[in-house]
Image (spheres, rainbow, N blue to C red):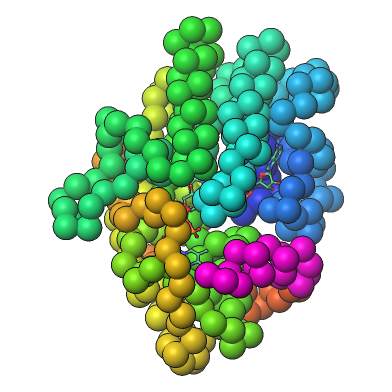
């Protein structure tokens, strides 16, 4: 089995590559990644010498390059993680989100149509469903929940999802889509909530909580997401959407307090800053379908996952220090200085 994994130098894509090479040692994995600010080649160092792994620096919007790679590799499957993924950046500059997340998805699927494919899998997000109110804990996102997006990021992901389903209906492309809740774990880029709070804590820097910090996210350990995608690409039904989440809802402020406590830092570091524009209130996934059809259940409890994640950042300063001391500082200054 030859699988092209796009966006494999990012957070979830790299964890997925490690998972696949371990669980399916006879598969060949070709990682296609543009290496944007969020892509990090050093993440893939542990597998670079694996004869069943190849890295190719390429933009998923580069039609010629993508077609050439298909001619060289004859992939059986494509799993598309490549995306601009940060909501705050999409609020500052939507255009690159439309380009990569929508045009890039179409380019990959055109290659799949031209050369033939057993499966195209789109890694999507629960953010396509918009948000749920805090006072209705009985409500969850199911696969039938209408698409109702809030940010340029989620709108671009929703646009891609609609296109994926259209390629299935119009051209018969064998597609599946997974819509997962917030992931956390090793190799999470430091601009996102959990790694940002861990690293700021370690530097005794203020911990910028948007608004009151009452927004709720449904956190899933990244390895559980990778297992879900592995199951969907092998056993999922073509043309179907699968929600992935572990019923682990937490308020942002509680996550930040927990990180302070785990690192022995005072809660006085917490600084409430101006809220995110259009900030989604609550995400909560109903994972009944993937459980009933594919037998998937999350394995890592949040209490264990967050401990492992904090320990990983303590043990892997070599990975995150070069990131936070480079261009990231300009980003941080721009996003947080006058907030
Ligand atoms: P990330 O930002 O850490 O990684 C994205 C990767 O894609 C990077 O390696 C980057 O270099 C690459 N990339 C960006 N533009 C590209 C392009 N034009 N061509 C080729 N490569 C390109 O993102 P992540 O958090 O790992 O998310 C991966 C996927 O999962 C995304 O599609 C995202 O929407 C989805 N998702 C993420 C979460 C989450 O909590 N992080 C939750 C649900 C779904
Ligand atoms: O400094 C911060 N302070 C803060 O309060 C940051 C970076 C975030 N937040 C809040 C905003 C959100 O309510 O924390 C919550 C989580 O924020 P992010 O880590 O930016 O994630 P989110 O916006 O929920 O989106 C993530 O999950 C869904 C991923 O980035 C998306 O790619 C995925 O689709």
Image spot of residue 47 (x, y percent): 76, 52
Q: What main secondary structure does the magenta stretch of the protein show?
A: helix
Question: Magenta segment, which residues?
Answer: 322-339
Write the residue at 46% across / 44% down: 151
Q: Position of residue 285 (x, y in %)?
A: 31, 47
Relative placement, left or right, of 1 versus 263 is right
Residue 336 part of the magenta segment: yes
- The quadrant where residue 309 appears: bottom right
Up/down of 307 relative to 96, above or below: below
Q: Does residue 131 belong to the magenta stretch? A: no
115 horizontally vs 222: left or right: right
Left or right placement of residue 240 versus residue 117 in this view = left
At which x and y percent is residue 149?
39, 38
Asked whether, in this view, residue 123 is left or right of residue 75, the answer is: left
Q: Residue at x 29, y 31 (%)?
A: 146
Write the residue at 32% across / 55% down.
Answer: 281
Query: Residue 142 versus residue 27: which sits nearer the camera?
Result: 142
Could you tell me residue 165's position as x and y percent? Answer: 45, 20
What residue lies at 61% left-to-right and 72% top-to-bottom?
Answer: 337
Which of the 4 image quarters holds residue 186?
A: bottom right
Image quarter in which the N terminus is found? top right
Inspect this view and state whether residue 192 appears: yes
Of residue 276 and residue 125, the one placed in the foreground of this image is 276
Residue 312 can be seen, yes or no: no
């Amino acid at each position: 089995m030859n699988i092209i994994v796009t966006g494999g130098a990012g957070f979830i894509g790299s964890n997925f590559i490690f998972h696949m090479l371990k669980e399916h040692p006879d598969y060949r994995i070709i990682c296609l990644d543009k290496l944007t600010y969020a892509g990090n080649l050093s993440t893939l160092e542990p597998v670079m010498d694996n004869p069943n792994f190849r890295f190719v620096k390429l933009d998923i919007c580069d039609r010629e390059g993508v077609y050439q790679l298909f001619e060289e590799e004859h992939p059986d499957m494509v799993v598309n993680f490549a995306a601009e993924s940060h909501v705050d950046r999409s609020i500052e500059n939507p255009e690159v989100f439309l380009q990569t997340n929508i045009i890039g998805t179409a380019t990959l699927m055109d290659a799949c149509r031209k050369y033939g494919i057993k499966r195209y899998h789109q890694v999507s997000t629960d953010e396509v469903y918009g948000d749920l109110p805090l006072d209705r804990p009985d409500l969850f996102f199911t696969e039938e929940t209408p698409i109702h997006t809030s940010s340029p990021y989620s709108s671009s992901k929703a646009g891609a999802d609609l296109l994926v389903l259209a390629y299935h209906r119009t051209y018969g492309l064998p597609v599946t889509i997974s819509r997962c809740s917030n992931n956390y774990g090793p190799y999470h880029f430091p601009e996102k909530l959990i790694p940002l709070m861990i690293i700021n804590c370690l530097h005794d820097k203020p911990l910028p909580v948007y608004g009151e910090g009452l927004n709720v996210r449904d956190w899933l350990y990244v390895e559980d997401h990778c297992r879900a995608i592995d199951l969907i690409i092998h056993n999922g039904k073509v043309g179907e959407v699968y929600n992935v989440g572990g019923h682990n809802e937490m308020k942002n402020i509680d996550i930040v307090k927990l990180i302070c406590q785990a690192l022995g830092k005072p809660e006085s570091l917490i600084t409430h800053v101006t809220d995110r524009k259009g900030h989604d209130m609550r995400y909560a996934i109903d994972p009944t379908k993937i459980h009933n059809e594919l037998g998937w259940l999350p394995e890592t409890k949040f209490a264990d996952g967050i401990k492992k994640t904090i320990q990983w950042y303590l043990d892997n300063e070599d990975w995150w220090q070069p990131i936070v001391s480079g261009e990231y500082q300009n980003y941080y200054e721009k996003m947080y200085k006058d907030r």
